[in-house]
Amino acid sequence: MSIRLLFPLLVILIFFSCANNQKPDDGPAEANDPDVEMPAPTSVSDHQLPYIDTEFTTDYIMGKFEPAQHPDFTIIEAKYAGREGMYLRKDTYEAFQDMYKAAKADGVDLKILSATRNFNSQKSIWQAKWTGARQVDGKDLSEAMPDAKERALKILEYSSMPGTSRHHWGTDIDLNSLNNNFFEEGEGKQVYAWLTQNAAGYGFCQPYTEKGPERPYGYNEERWHWSYMPVARPLTLLAEERLENEMIEGFAGAEAAGRIDVVRKYVLGINPECRK
């Protein structure tokens, strides 16, 4: 037989040999194959790994960035919010959406009233109270409390100094009402009972519980305030390592930060359960 005739025969033999030796599991499995167990899709609802595009910095902890321009943040849809234009971290937002659906199934409606507030947003709240443009307990504090420490402590009952708020982080939300009395009866009582029983399962913790031996310092109780702990916990530890009273500046009344020891007593003065 001539070489010209042997060549195509040789090609055919090689082709069939390769086809028979190919393993059946080469290449991806079909998603609709009932006999193949596909890997479970990953989800933020697993509450393990947050979206972190860049290493956290002191500026991040202090809210010195613009959430609308940060890659880890997203705007909150109107159906979840009490007003337009609020932002959260993507991981926190997805975890909240999971919690929202579960609460809804149990007849509880969760509504975000406040979310991320950067340094400048917190500064506008603080200075309005500091200057008397916004009254506190019906008083103009600029007149009623001329001493800087006394005035700052009064504002700190419910509002953070700029640079010290957990709302800077994009992990914290205020839900349904900003009045503790709302959560004592009726719909509010149902909301709070559901949160205390179920929020931890979605990664959320109430940082400002009633003050007592385990939490002697910090803000007054806030039943509406919940933190997404998979991200807020490492940020709390970072604040403990890096944040100092001397760094709290750039607004009226900042001189009181050291006299109060605002980092230790307020930034770190949280529910011990939220630090575990």
Image: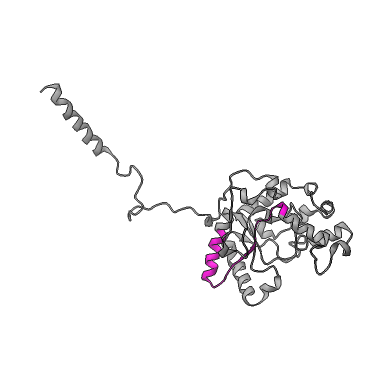
Left or right: 41 in relation to 152: left
Expressed as whole percent of the image width and height from the top left, the position of residue 42 reads 48, 52
Look at the picture and state if 135 lies above or below 29.
below
In this view, the residue farthest toward the left is 1
Expressed as whole percent of the image width and height from the top left, the position of residue 3 reads 15, 22
Rendered residue at 64%/54% (across/down): 170
Look at the picture and state if 58 lies above or below 74.
above
Left or right: 21 in relation to 204: left
In the rendered structure, does residue 40 fall within the stretch colored magenta? no
In the rendered structure, does residue 111 fall within the stretch colored magenta? yes
In this view, the residue farthest toward the top is 2
Residues shaded magenta: 95-120
Residue sitting nearer the eye, 35 or 94: 94
Expressed as whole percent of the image width and height from the top left, the position of residue 226 reads 64, 62
Left or right: 107 in relation to 22: right
Rendered residue at 62%/48% (across/down): 69
Quadrant holding the N terminus: top left
Q: How is the image coloured?
A: one colour
Look at the picture and state if 15 lies above or below 102.
above
Count every numbered label the image shows and give the total.
0
Image quarter of residue 161: bottom right
Image quarter of residue 224: bottom right
Quadrant holding the C terminus: bottom right
Rendered residue at 62%/56% (across/down): 87
Residue sitting nearer the eye, 198 or 179: 179
Residue sitting nearer the eye, 225 or 79: 79
